[in-house]
Amino acid sequence: MSECVEVRLREVRARLGLSQEKLARAVGVTRQTIIAIEKGRYLPSLPLALKLAAYLGLPVEELFRLKEECKQF
């Protein structure tokens, strides 16, 4: 399923000038978790995705998007 999700966390975090460490501490995870999410190796739980979005002041859909090819219902 992770191949169906476009993760934009890295670009948003960089645009805001946040380090991985600062973001990780703010949402209660390790820096390694943030790295894994940014590299697409790990999809966060819904509560973590919502925490990330809230901390960054964005809707969750700005950080995680379903790829077009996976939108077949």
Image: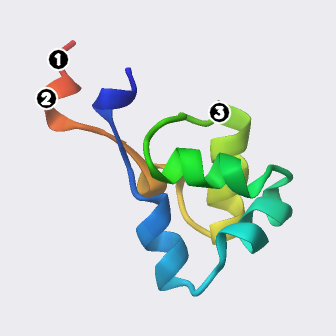
Decide which of tag 3 and tag 2 comes sooner along the chain: 3
- Tell me the quarter of the image containing the C terminus: top left
Q: Which residue is mark 3?
A: 46
Q: Which residue is mark 1?
A: 72
Q: Residues within 10 Å of mark 3 (few under 14, many from 20)?
A: few
Q: CA distance from mark 3 to mark 1?
A: 22 Å
Q: CA distance from mark 3 to mark 2?
A: 22 Å
* Rendered residue at 63%/44% (across/down): 49
Which residue lies most toward the bottom here?
17
Q: Residue at x 67, y 56 (%)?
A: 52
In percent of width and height, residue 55 lies at 72, 66
Q: Residues within 10 Å of mark 2 (few under 14, many from 20)?
A: few
Element carrying mark 1 = loop
Q: Residues within 10 Å of mark 1 (few under 14, many from 20)?
A: few
Q: Residue at x 71, y 42 (%)?
A: 48
Q: Position of residue 54 (x, y in %)?
A: 69, 60
- Secondary structure category for the residue under label 3: helix
Q: Please give the label number shown on residue 36.
A: none
- Kind of residue sitting beneath label 3: Leu
